[in-house]
C-alpha cells in the first residue's frame, strides 16, 4: 500500500505543477503567447537545422595530379574502399581513425557504386571491362571481367528485381544490366527521346531507386528525364525540357539522390544552374533555380553527384569549387556556404592546404554517409576530407 500511496502522491504533484504552468502561461502578455508550431514529419524525423557541418581533413596523404577515385563503398569493419578512376588506386579510409592509406595493388576505371541487397557493393565500370565487388560482411574485394570493351558506365541503381541497371555515357544510349542473383550481364538500347541532346547525344549520368523499386535517371547532355519501372521497362517521362538553364555541350545533371521522406529524387547540376526534382508519386518533375548570388561566384563545375546529409538536407559535393550548396527537400529552400578558409587549413592558399594541383581534377568526388559524418572521395587533392554533422 505504501508504494501505491507514493505513486498517487507523485501524480498529484505532477497535476499541481501542470496547473501552475498553465496559470503562468495565462499571465504572460498576449504577444508572447504564440502557439507552438507542430513540425512536419520530415523536419521532426530528420531534425533539419540551419547550422552547417564542420569541415575536417583526414590524416594521411596520397599525392598525384589525377582524379584518384570516384567510388566509395563501406564494409562491416568501418573501412571505406575507393577504387581508381583514371589511376590505379585502392584507397582505404579507416572511419574509426579518420585516416586514409593506399592499398596495393590498385585498380582503375571505376565510377559510382551500388550497395545491393545481396550483401555486396558493386563498383560501376567506366574505363574498365570488369565489375568490382565488395563483400561487405568480410571486406573482400574481387573483380569480375564481364565485358569485351569498356562500357563507359557512369552510374547505376538496383531495381526491385535484383538487377542493377547501369546507364552509359555514350551518344547512342545503352543500358547495361547486372543480375545480382546470377551474375549475368546484359544490355539494351532504349528508344530515342522526342528531344535529343546536342548532336543526338542522350548520355545519362545518374540513377536512383525509389521505395517501389523504380529507377529515375536524368540526362547529362539531353533534356529528357528517363525511368525504368519495377518491371524493367524503360521510358521517358512526359514534361518540359529539363535544360538546367544551360545549352550546348554542357553537363547538366550528374547523379540522382532519392529522399524517401518526400518520395522525390533530387538531381544536382555539375555545370547547370538549376536543381531537378522528380516526384515519384506521379512522375512529374520541375527545375528550380540556384541562388543568383551563388551563381555569380561559383565555378562552372559546381558539384559531383551530391548526397543526402544526416541532417536531412541534400548537399552538393565539392568539385572545382570550395563552395557547397544544399536544398531543403521539404520546402525547396536553397542555401550555400564557402569552405575556402577550411580548405586552406592555416596555409596561405587553398592549393597549399589541400594539395590540389589542378581544378580540373576536383576537390572531391563521391560521398558516403556514415552515422553523423560524410566522407568525400579523394579527387585531385592529396588530402581527403569529411563533414561532421
Image (cartoon, rainbow, N blue to C red):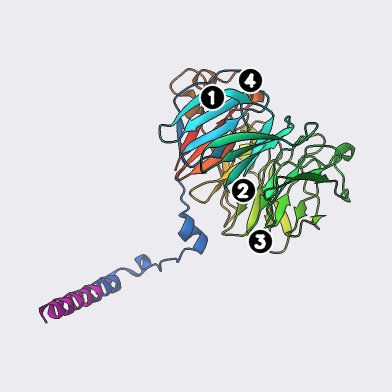
As drawn, which residue projects farthest toward the left? 2
Question: Which is more N-terminal, label 3 or label 1?
Answer: 1
Q: CA distance from mark 1 to mark 2?
A: 24 Å
Where is residue 383? Give x, y as percent: 51, 24
The quadrant the N terminus occupies is bottom left
Residue 212's tag is 3
User: Residue 300's quadrant in the figure?
Assistant: top right
Residue visible at 29% across and 74% down in the picture: 26
Question: Which residue is the site of mark 1?
Answer: 103
* Span of residues in magenta: 1-18
Residue visible at 72% across and 56% down in the picture: 285
Q: Which sits in the foreground, 271 or 356?
A: 356
The local crowd at label 2, few if under 14, some if 14 to 19, many if 20 or more residues have their Cα within 10 Å, is some
Residue visible at 55% across and 34% down in the picture: 81
The local crowd at label 4, few if under 14, some if 14 to 19, many if 20 or more residues have their Cα within 10 Å, is some
Q: Nearer the viewer, mark 2 or mark 4?
A: 2
Badge 1 vs badge 2, beta-carbon distance below 8 Å: no
Question: Which is more N-terminal, label 4 or label 1?
Answer: 1
Amino acid at each position: 500500500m505504501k508504494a501505491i500511496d507514493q505513486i498517487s502522491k507523485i501524480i498529484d504533484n505532477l497535476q499541481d505543477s501542470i496547473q501552475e504552468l498553465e496559470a503562468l502561461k495565462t499571465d504572460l502578455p498576449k504577444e508572447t503567447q504564440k502557439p507552438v508550431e507542430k513540425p512536419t514529419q520530415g523536419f521532426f524525423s530528420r531534425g533539419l537545422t540551419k547550422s552547417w557541418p564542420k569541415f575536417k581533413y583526414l590524416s594521411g596523404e596520397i599525392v598525384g595530379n589525377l582524379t584518384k577515385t570516384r567510388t566509395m563503398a563501406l564494409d562491416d569493419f568501418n573501412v571505406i574502399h575507393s577504387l581508381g578512376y583514371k589511376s590505379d588506386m585502392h584507397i582505404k579510409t579507416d572511419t574509426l581513425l579518420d585516416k586514409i592509406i593506399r592499398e596495393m595493388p590498385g585498380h582503375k576505371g571505376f565510377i559510382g557504386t551500388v550497395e545491393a541487397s545481396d550483401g555486396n557493393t558493386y563498383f560501376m565500370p567506366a574505363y574498365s571491362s570488369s565489375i568490382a565487388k565488395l563483400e561487405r560482411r568480410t571486406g573482400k574485394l574481387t573483380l569480375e571481367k564481364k565485358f569485351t570493351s569498356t562500357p563507359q558506365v557512369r552510374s547505376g541503381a538496383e531495381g526491385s528485381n535484383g538487377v542493377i541497371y547501369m546507364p552509359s555515357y555514350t551518344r547512342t544510349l545503352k543500358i547495361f544490366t547486372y543480375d545480382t542473383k546470377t551474375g549475368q550481364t546484359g544490355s539494351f538500347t532504349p528508344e530515342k527521346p522526342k528531344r535529343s541532346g546536342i548532336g543526338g547525344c542522350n548520355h545519362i549520368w545518374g540513377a536512383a531507386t525509389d521505395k517501389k523499386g523504380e529507377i529515375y535517371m536524368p540526362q547529362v547532355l539531353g533534356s529528357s528525364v528517363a525511368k525504368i519501372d519495377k518491371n524493367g521497362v524503360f521510358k521517358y517521362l512526359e514534361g518540359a525540357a529539363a535544360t538546367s538553364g544551360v545549352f550546348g555541350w554542357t553537363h547538366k545533371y550528374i547523379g540522382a539522390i532519392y529522399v524517401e521522406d518526400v518520395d522525390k529524387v533530387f538531381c544536382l547540376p555539375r555545370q547547370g544552374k538549376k536543381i531537378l526534382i522528380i516526384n515519384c508519386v506521379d512522375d512529374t518533375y520541375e527545375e528550380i533555380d540556384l541562388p543568383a548570388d551563388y551563381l555569380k561566384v561559383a565555378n562552372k563545375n559546381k558539384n559531383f553527384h551530391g548526397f543526402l546529409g544526416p541532417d536531412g538536407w541534400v548537399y552538393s559535393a565539392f568539385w572545382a569549387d570550395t563552395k557547397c550548396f544544399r536544398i531543403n527537400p521539404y520546402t525547396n529552400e536553397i542555401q550555400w556556404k564557402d569552405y575556402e578558409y577550411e580548405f586552406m587549413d592555416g596555409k596561405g592558399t587553398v592549393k597549399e592546404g589541400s594539395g590540389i594541383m589542378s581544378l580540373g581534377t576536383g576537390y572531391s568526388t563521391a560521398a558516403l554517409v556514415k552515422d553523423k559524418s560524410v566522407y568525400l572521395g579523394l579527387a585531385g587533392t592529396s588530402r581527403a576530407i569529411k563533414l561532421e554533422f
